Structures are given as C-alpha cells and as structure tokens.
Amino acid sequence: MKKLLWLATLSVVLLMSFGMDVQSQPKEVTDAVTVTYYVTPKTLPLDEGRVRLNYESVGILISDTGGGLFHGATIHALGGFTVEKGRSNDEQAWGVYNLQNGDKVFFAVTPVGEMGPGGGDEAKGAATFTGGTGKCAGIKGSYTFTRHSLRPALEGIRQVYQKGTIKYTLP
C-alpha cells in the first residue's frame, strides 16, 4: 500500500511538473497578411542624384485568413530614407499597430529597395516587434514583407501595398 501511495504521489508530482512546463512555453503564431498604406512624403534634395524622403504613413492590415490578432489592425508609422541613384538602403521607420481589441503593438522596420518614377518600385524588409500593451505586453516576433509602390491617385502622396508574414509569440 505504501508503494502504491508513493507511486501515485510521484506520478502526480511529475505530471504537474511536465504539464506546467508544456503550458508555459508560448506557441508561435504565423499569419500571412496584406497591408495597404497611404504615405505623405517630404522630399529634401541633397545633391546630384541624391534625395532624402521623410514620411508619415497610415494603413490597414488584413489577414489572408480573415481572422487573427492582427486582422483589421490600423497602422501609423514615421520613417525616412535616402535615395541615391534610384536605390535606398538606409530606410528606418517606427510605428504602432492599433489592434481591434484596443491593444497596441510597437515595431521598428528596415526595408531595402529600388525607387521607380511615379510608383512601380519594390522593397523587401522586416519589422521587429518592440513591445505592446494589454494582452500584447511582452510580444516577441517579426513581420517580413515585400512592398510594392503603385502610381498614386493624387499628386504628392505615395500609395503602397505589402504582402508578408507575421510571426509572433505572446507571453
């Protein structure tokens, strides 16, 4: 009887230990998304063949599955880059995803790409999540994408869309 009680106690202790360890490991979520942006750039000529563009952008993110944490998020970002001979390789931007549940996820991004006249350029990049609020406090993850610029509907703005993948874990 003592052996049976000891074995039962040991089983419960081991089950609780391993069961809690499995529960405490966050699950990585992967989501394919499409993002559209409306961008207001400010252009500063530097010298022959070089310009600096600083911008503010607002956008929306739609998950390809039609659901998930980031589906329907609005985005606000500020950034800038230098274009030299049609190529940019120093772009940096910072922003926030405003999620449908009211939480926010903050990010920093560094794309690299080509600039085409009147749209038509493409850039690849990655954003890193730097923090969040509410349920997203402590979020870890990234967003890799390919950005395509389109011919804008109005003079003085840029319109772009991105196709990419978000990967994240919540604490």
Image (cartoon, grey):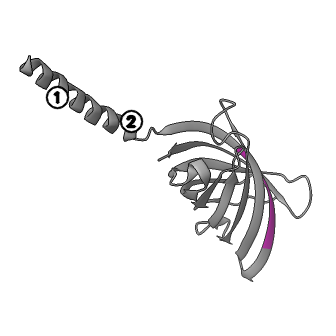
**Mark 1 — residue?**
10
Position of 62 compared to 153: left or right?
left
Q: Give the quadrant of residue 32.
A: top right
109 or 43: nearer the eye?
109
Residue type highlighted by circle 2: Gln
Say above or below: 94 vs 125: below
Magenta segment boundaries in residue numbering: 35-42
| Image location (x, y in percent) of residue 30 | 53, 37
| Image location (x, y in percent) of residue 46 | 72, 82
- Res 23 label: 2
Is residue 36 among the parts visible in the rendering? no
Would you call the spot at circle 1 few (<14 residues within 10 Å), some (14-19), or many (20 or more)?
few
Say above or below: 97 vs 14: below
Is 22 part of what is drawn in magenta?
no
Mark 1 element type: helix
Q: Residue at x 76, y 65 (%)?
A: 56
Position of 170 compared to 9: left or right?
right
Is 39 part of what is drawn in magenta?
yes
Q: Give the quadrant of residue 25.
A: top left
Q: Residue at x 55, y 56 (%)?
A: 129
Which is more N-terminal, label 1 or label 2? 1
Is residue 38 among the parts visible in the rendering? yes
Would you call the spot at circle 2 few (<14 residues within 10 Å), some (14-19), or many (20 or more)?
few
